[in-house]
Image (cartoon, rainbow, N blue to C red):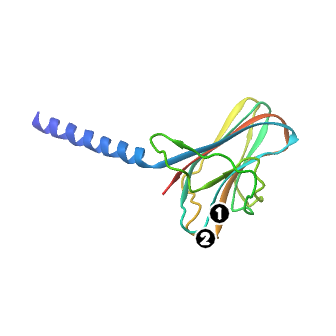
């Protein structure tokens, strides 16, 4: 019985430590909802300089019509249109990674692509990708659509270290 209590206490301490570690991460989301008429849209998160490290978690796309969901990295730096990075959870600090809605980031290297049916949600796991603090001066990851007519919602979630 004493061993069981000790094991249970150890398990609870590990879980509590893990939960606190997750709560202390600086997580952010950027999103964009848009009505397109024969056009594409792109949402980008971007690190400029070596003092920023972003770890993208996921990207998702939801459209009222069939769509292509395309993820690319390291396109030409985005310069318009600045979007609002929203802290998630207990994190209240401002993001150091910059976000752009209706982004003008260059195409970059396509790393994932998915066809979505109308009224469905597509999602990509982006864990394992980093932007900033290593490699080129400006690094970015962009979620974009093909040319379409319909309503779309795009989201990217990331952690900063």
> Eyeballing the image, is 69 above or below 129?
above
**In the rendered structure, are the residues bearing label 1 and label 2 in contact, judged by CB atoms less than 8 Å apart?**
yes
Of 71 and 78, nearer the camera is: 78
Of 13 and 31, nearer the camera is: 31
> Eyeballing the image, is 35 above or below 112?
above
Of 112 and 57, nearer the camera is: 57
State the residue position of label 2: 135
Residue closest to the far right: 38
- Residue 98 sits in which quadrant? bottom right
Across and down, in percent, residue 12 comes to 26, 39
Across and down, in percent, residue 50 comes to 56, 69
> Disc number at residue 139?
1
Residue closest to the far left: 2
Across and down, in percent, residue 2 comes to 10, 36
Name the residue located 59 percent from the left edge and 56 percent from the top edge: 97
For the residue labelled by badge 2, is the local secondary structure a helix, a strand or a loop? loop
> Disc number at residue 124?
none
Neighbour class for label 1 at 10 Å: few (<14), some, many (≥20)? Answer: many
For the residue labelled by badge 1, is the local secondary structure a helix, a strand or a loop? strand
């Amino acid at each position: 019985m004493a061993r069981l209590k000790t094991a249970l206490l150890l398990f609870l301490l590990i879980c509590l430590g893990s939960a606190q570690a997750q709560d202390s991460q600086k997580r952010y989301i950027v999103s964009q909802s848009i009505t397109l008429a024969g056009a594409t849209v792109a949402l980008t998160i971007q690190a400029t300089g070596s003092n920023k490290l972003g770890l993208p978690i996921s990207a998702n796309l939801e459209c009222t019509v069939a769509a292509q969901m395309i993820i690319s990295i390291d396109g030409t730096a985005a310069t318009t249109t600045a979007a609002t990075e929203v802290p998630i959870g207990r994190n209240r600090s401002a993001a150091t990674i910059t976000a752009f809605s209706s982004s003008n980031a260059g195409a970059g290297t396509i790393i994932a692509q998915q066809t979505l049916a109308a009224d469905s949600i597509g999602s990509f796991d982006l864990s394992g990708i980093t932007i900033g603090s290593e490699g080129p001066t400006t690094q970015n990851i962009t979620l974009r659509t093909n040319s379409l007519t319909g309503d779309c919602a795009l989201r990217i979630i990331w952690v900063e270290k």
